[in-house]
């Protein structure tokens, strides 16, 4: 899937340039709501989808924002691009750097390509099914292969989650009792952290979210040697009606997965 990977990388980079330009001029919103959307989201999405449509005009598109290119394209098909133009818009709006661009490609229901770009941090993580997961950061000369961590006990693990209210302990932390907790916006960023081995697991307990929230990051973790399922071990499927995900998400280094599933069900 070299052509699909190159298209995803080019699309993400185009969007990243647009986002950074907007980011420099954007006035921070300290109390930004979780569902905030900005003009940068829509401009980023149009840049990504236009790039993909240039190269694969017959492919279906699934994306978060209602934009013209999305409206003109099929929404379902054997070849499907799943896009989140700014994942973690709250981090963009607060100007804390915690946001990413996510571009995923699904063929016949199976994720084939995933790209997660963190424009502010100049970090790129990408994967192709069967080809491993790779990172390219800053001015690095070339990509480096990613591997998940080797942590084998929850008591030694670092869990990544969204920012919690001050003084509040999240359900996953109570259930799993990890050694450390890291907090950030953007599911794409969290999944990239697991794939890179910088944290050991990520738990999403939302009752419902969408394909674009996790698709591109999902393959990063699995190609880096980890495991991704629903909160009860369900296989996650993409491209279903409404692009809904209703099983939550558990992404781990694989070694912690069964123990995490057990702990979450007990908790």
Image: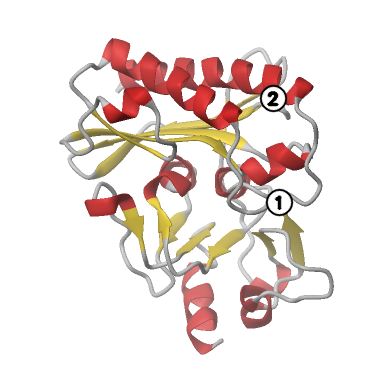
Residue visible at 71% across and 39% down? 93
Residue visible at 42% across and 64% down? 208
- What residue is shown with label 2? 122
In this view of the protein, can residue 129 be seen by the observer?
A: no
Q: Tell whether label 2 touches label 1 (CB within 8 Å).
A: no
Whole-percent x, y for residue 110 in the image? 25, 43
The answer to whether residue 45 is above or below residue 261 is above
Residue visible at 37% across and 16% down? 50
- Quadrant in which the N terminus appears: top left
Answer left or right for 60 relative to 128.
left
Q: Which residue lies furthest to the bottom in this view?
A: 266
Q: Considering only order in the chain, which callout, 2 or 1, is on the residue closer to the N terminus?
A: 2
Whole-percent x, y for residue 240 in the image? 23, 52
Mark 2 lies on a secondary structure that is: loop
- Quadrant in which the C terminus appears: bottom right
Residue visible at 50% across and 28% down? 42
**Residue 153, located in which quarter of the rendered image?**
bottom right
The answer to whether residue 45 is above or below residue 216 is above
- What residue is shown with label 1? 184
Whole-percent x, y for residue 180 in the image? 77, 65
**Residue 247, located in which quarter of the rendered image?**
bottom left
57 and 171: which one is in front?
A: 57
The answer to whether residue 178 is above or below residue 52 is below
Whole-percent x, y for residue 2 in the image? 33, 18
């Amino acid at each position: 899937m070299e052509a699909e990977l190159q298209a995803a990388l080019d699309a993400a980079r185009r969007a990243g340039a647009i986002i950074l330009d907007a980011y420099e001029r954007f006035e921070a919103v300290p109390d930004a709501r979780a569902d905030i959307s900005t003009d940068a989201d829509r401009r980023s999405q149009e840049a990504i989808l236009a790039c993909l449509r240039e190269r694969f005009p017959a492919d279906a598109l699934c994306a978060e924002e209602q934009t013209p290119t999305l409206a003109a394209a099929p929404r379902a098909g054997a070849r499907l691009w799943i896009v989140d133009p700014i994942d973690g818009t709250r981090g963009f709006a607060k100007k804390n750097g915690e946001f990413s661009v996510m571009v995923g490609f699904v063929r016949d229901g199976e994720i084939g390509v995933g790209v997660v770009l963190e424009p502010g941090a100049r970090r790129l993580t990408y994967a192709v099914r069967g080809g491993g997961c790779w990172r390219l950061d800053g001015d690095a000369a070339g990509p480096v292969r990613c591997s998940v961590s080797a942590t084998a006990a929850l008591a030694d693990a670092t869990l990544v989650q969204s920012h919690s209210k001050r003084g509040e302990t999240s359900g996953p932390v109570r259930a799993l009792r990890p050694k450390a907790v890291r907090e950030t916006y953007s599911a794409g960023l969290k999944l990239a952290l697991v794939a890179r081995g910088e944290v050991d697991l990520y738990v999403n307990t939302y009752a419902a979210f969408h394909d674009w929230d996790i698709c591109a990051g999902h393959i990063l973790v699995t190609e880096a040697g980890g495991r991704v399922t629903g909160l009860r071990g369900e296989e996650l499927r993409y491209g279903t009606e409404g692009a809904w995900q209703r099983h939550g998400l558990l992404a781990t280094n694989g070694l912690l997965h069964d123990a995490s599933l057990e702990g979450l069900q007990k908790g």
